Image: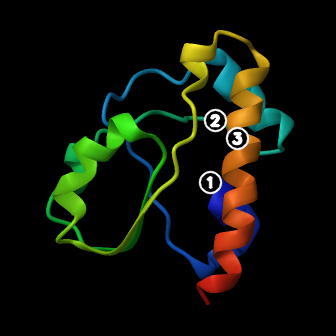
Amino acid sequence: MLLHSMAGDRFEAFSAGSEPDQPHAFTLEALEKQGLPVTDLKSKSLDLFEGEHFDCVIVLCDKARQACREFEGGAGEILHWDIRDPRLIGKPDAYEQALLEIRRRLQLWIPLHK
């Protein structure tokens, strides 16, 4: 959703987690502040994408890095962006800071992938 808002239809993006759960209220709030839709937002498991090939997989934390090893043979590029988990910080603005960090990194990544 964030990549789509930044790059339009240039990329087909999917999102999944190593430990999917209900989206945290602070996550939804941070997304809404950035003008991103949150209707029907839900976490998905990496298992849904088992056996799929991706041009690029972006892993957002070291914890998920181990779980994403299965994509090493099925991805053209794997990036590891160690974004600190806002749940571990315990402050409401940590979610917004994490989203802003992901946005900054995508701003650098998008122009390199036409």
Image marks 3 and 1: residues in contact by CB distance under 8 Å: no
Mark 3 vs mark 2, foreground winner is: 3
Disc number for residue 99: 3
Q: CA distance from mark 3 to mark 1?
A: 12 Å
Left or right: 58, with 51 as reference point:
right
Residue 19 location, x and y as percent?
32, 28
Helix, strand or loop for disc 2: loop
Q: How many marks?
A: 3
Helix, strand or loop for disc 3: helix
Position above or below: 20 against 49: above
Label 3 sits on what residue type?
Leu
Residue 28 location, x and y as percent?
68, 27
Helix, strand or loop for disc 1: loop
Crowding at label 1, few (<14), some or many (≥20) Cα neighbours within 10 Å? some
Residue under numbered circle 1: 1
Disc number for residue 66: none
Label 1 sits on what residue type?
Met
Position above or below: 89 against 15: above
Nearest the eye: 82 or 59 = 82
Residue under numbered circle 2: 39
* Lower position in the chain sequence, tag 3 or tag 2: 2
Crowding at label 3, few (<14), some or many (≥20) Cα neighbours within 10 Å? some
| Observer able to see residue 37 | no
* Lower position in the chain sequence, tag 3 or tag 1: 1
